[in-house]
Amino acid sequence: MLQDEKRDLMMCKNCVLQLDKIAKIKQLTSKDLFILRHPRRSVNINYPVRMDNGIIKIISAFRIQYNDSLGPTKGGIRFHETVNQEDVVELAFLMTLKTSLVGIPYGGAKGGVKINPKELSDGELERVSRGYVREMFAFIGPKNDIPAPDVNTSPKIMGWMMDEYEKIAGEKSPGAFTGKPILLGGSFGRDSSTAKGIFFIIEEKYKKEKKEKLKVSIQGFGNAGSTLAKFLFDAGYKVVAVSDSSSGIYNEKGLNIDKLKEFKKSGGSFSDLEEELISNEDVLKLDVDILVPAALGGVISEENVKDIKAKTILELANAPIAPEVDTYLHEVGIEVVPDILSNSGGVIVSYFEWVQNSQNYYWEEDLVDEKLKKVILTTYKKVLEESKKCNLNLRTTSYFIAINRILKAEKLRGAL
């Protein structure tokens, strides 16, 4: 009984909710569900790091390797003061489905370090990063589990981590991490790949529409959100609202994204602008053609779902829509392109980076973009086709396709 209780602690509620929906459509055995509900490996660490003032601080961190039936696990590492194990389990679950859905030979993983990076000096951040690698070294590597950037991590941090890994391994191993600086083996196009992938989907979906008439609202103006806003602005879409952590801004005639990016680069907050300010919450409630939640998870929930007026939602953040409101959105005719499809550009190009590292042969950005577009649009069209055939929403269809591949791989390995 005690062992069962421990296993239950490793199950994330949202994963179970989503899997239960699939189980009602597809006949899943108890063994299928057990494998899909529980991560393969969980590594919890508490390690000491010396701060600049000489004080030793104990850092709590996680790495969840959810499933590796299709290949080595893959997933980002986030630095955040509120990160917890259940969050990381859910993110690793989503990454498992994402890599399966787009057909790249990876499983899914995720990592978290419980710190506020804004409170650390550059030196402290480097010691935290290198310490994480020393503690995790036995569990990661180019043939086992390949970390990448996530919330509050960057190419610079991946460079530190790769360097620490190579020191311990005693050999060059650029494929141990992706999202690295170009000079250290990173891939051209990786920094913009998450936004570029969702942009390709939007372009495909609205290829017959007049772009200047399509209104877009984006909640979140971090790397992915601001990059997508720039792509859409340059292509002629009318981006009427964006937000950062301080405030949202709105202009029904369209915002100048170039000016906003320059303003953010200078360190400003949207709340300081002389624009029409709206709340982060109100950015979600605008009557627009396209809504892109690009910040945090769970921002569309039972509390606000009935206020959502967008015609289509494309998830740039991970799990921005609570599982229990998916059905309502489908019933009222709001199409949702799920995160495991719409934000998969990042992991697709991470895979390309890993391939380039393995070959020690590097591609121009145009070739990376061409390959990304082919993979993500092939997947998008397949999901659309299956969705119409089975009369299911895009999320359920995406999960269905991803889970089928995982279970087939588990069966071929003899686990089922």
Image: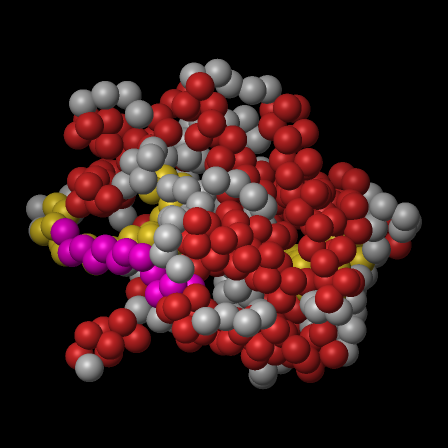
277 and 310: which is toward the camera: 310
**Quarter of the image that includes the C terminus:** bottom left
Q: Residue at x 30, y 31 (%)?
A: 162
Q: Which residue corresponds to the image point at 23% horizontal and 21% vertical from the top-left?
A: 171
Q: How many marks?
A: 0
- Find residue 85 and report its image quarter: bottom left
User: Can you name the residue that lies furthest to the top here?
Assistant: 361
Q: Is residue 198 above or below residue 217?
A: above
Toward which corner of the image does residue 116 lie, by quadrant?
bottom left
Image quadrant of residue 287?
Answer: bottom right
Left or right: where 170 falls relative to 113? left
Residue 310 image offset from top left, x and y in percent: 75, 68
Instruction: Pinpoint residue 120: horizontal percent, then vertical percent.
Output: 27, 48
Q: Which coloring applies here?
A: secondary structure
The region drawn magenta spans 35-47
Is residue 258 visible to the viewer in this orientation of the structure?
A: no
Going by the image, does 77 lie left or right of 128? right
- Frontmost residue, 98 versus 321: 98
Q: Residue at x 17, y 45 (%)?
A: 135
Is residue 360 visible in this depiction of the protein? yes
Residue in the picture at 58% in, 39% down = 193
Measuring from the top left, give residue 129's x and y in whole percent: 26, 42
- Front residue of 397 and 12: 397
Asked if the magenta segment contains residue 44, the reply would be: yes
Taking the magenta stretch, the answer to whether it contains residue 162 is: no
Q: Quadrant location of the N terminus?
A: bottom left
Vertical comparison of 80 with 263: above or below? below
User: Relative to the observer, which residue lies in front, 81 or 28?
Assistant: 28
